[in-house]
Amino acid sequence: MKAFPKTSDYSRAIFIGITLLILSQVTWWTFVFLKNVDEKANLELRHLEFKYGEASSVEKRVEADQIHQAASRSHFMFLSESVFFALLTCVGLYVLFSMYRRDQRIRRQQRQFIEMVSHESKTPLTALKLRLESIAETYEDRDGLKGQISLAVTEIRRLSGVLQKVLDWDRMERHELIFEPIVLREAIDRIMHRLGPLLEQRQVVVEINVSSGLLVQADEMTLSSSLQSVIENAVLYPAEVLKWIRVDADLDSRGRVRLLIEDNGEGISQADRSRIFDRFYRGRSISAISGTGLGLYLAKLFISAHRGSIQVVDGKGKGACFEIILPCAPEGL
């Protein structure tokens, strides 16, 4: 099990390292300048010995005193400037670090607020969805009531998905992803179970060709959120005939897990492929389908955090095909 270190630990270490580096550089250059001043003064004094000889004279003493005074002034100037620069640097770094900590504290409060709202909203939304589904199953359809309830359940499911993405995004920003070996087939089965009502409503046939022994090194929550976003997109794309989704997985030549999610929908145009993972971007062909434009953006963000990759590739048919590369768990197959 592996978790990211906290950002505050990195930032504190970086500020301390920069401070020590600057202070050491100031100390070193101060030592070099003072040494040069002393060497210059010694050379000038030796020049006086050649000029006046060993005999003592008033001129010799006066010039020697001037050399010592000039050296003392240079010593005082370099030392005072070095101390002032070191103090100014320390104060400036302290102010920057304080501002950074305050900004981090404000962002942490914002994240806590978002997390609280998301968590507190998911429970009543789940309860409301279950009640509506129960009503739809129990009572007879009157004046299209079941159709309206079905639309309401779909919107609740979509809102719950958005809240879950916000929570996952917040976790990743806080570097709280926990990587551990995960059975990929079980993770996909859980996603399909959650999407069961939607798959049944859309009459989607799902084919899963994933070995039960295939393990990936991943954070289960963000990985499931990423795969679910891709699969939900495949469900929402209309098809001319019976809708189907195929999920295949195997190992590539580098020993990584290669996951393909393909459907028989309208596909993704070449113009949209380059921007399909941009934040808030929605393809031209799905403008009539409701969405936020965040699903695939977050999916790419999460999978990149796994040191993996996701891209649109050419499939066997004309539908969309997503290729996802994930690191294989150390335990392997």
Image (spheres, rainbow, N blue to C red):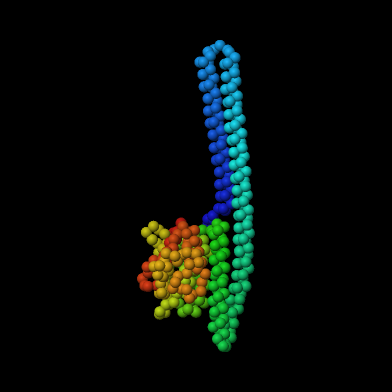
Nearest the camera: 330 or 238?
Answer: 238
Horizontal side of residue 130 vs 276, given as left or right: right
Q: Is residue 317 above or below residue 91?
A: below
On the question of residue 305 being in view, the answer is yes
Q: Seen from this angle, which residue lies furthest left?
A: 316
Q: Whole-percent x and y of residue 104?
A: 60, 55
Q: Whole-percent x and y of residue 203?
A: 46, 79
Q: Whole-percent x and y of residue 46?
A: 52, 18
Q: Residue at x 62, y 46 (%)?
A: 94
Residue 205: image quadrant is bottom left
Quarter containing the C terminus: bottom left
Q: Seen from this angle, which residue lies furthest top?
A: 55
Q: Whole-percent x and y of residue 148?
A: 56, 82
Horizontal side of residue 81 vs 306, given as left or right: right
Nearest the camera: 208 or 167?
Answer: 167
Q: Which residue is drawn at 63% across and 55% down?
A: 105
Q: Which residue is drawn at 57% across and 81% down?
A: 149
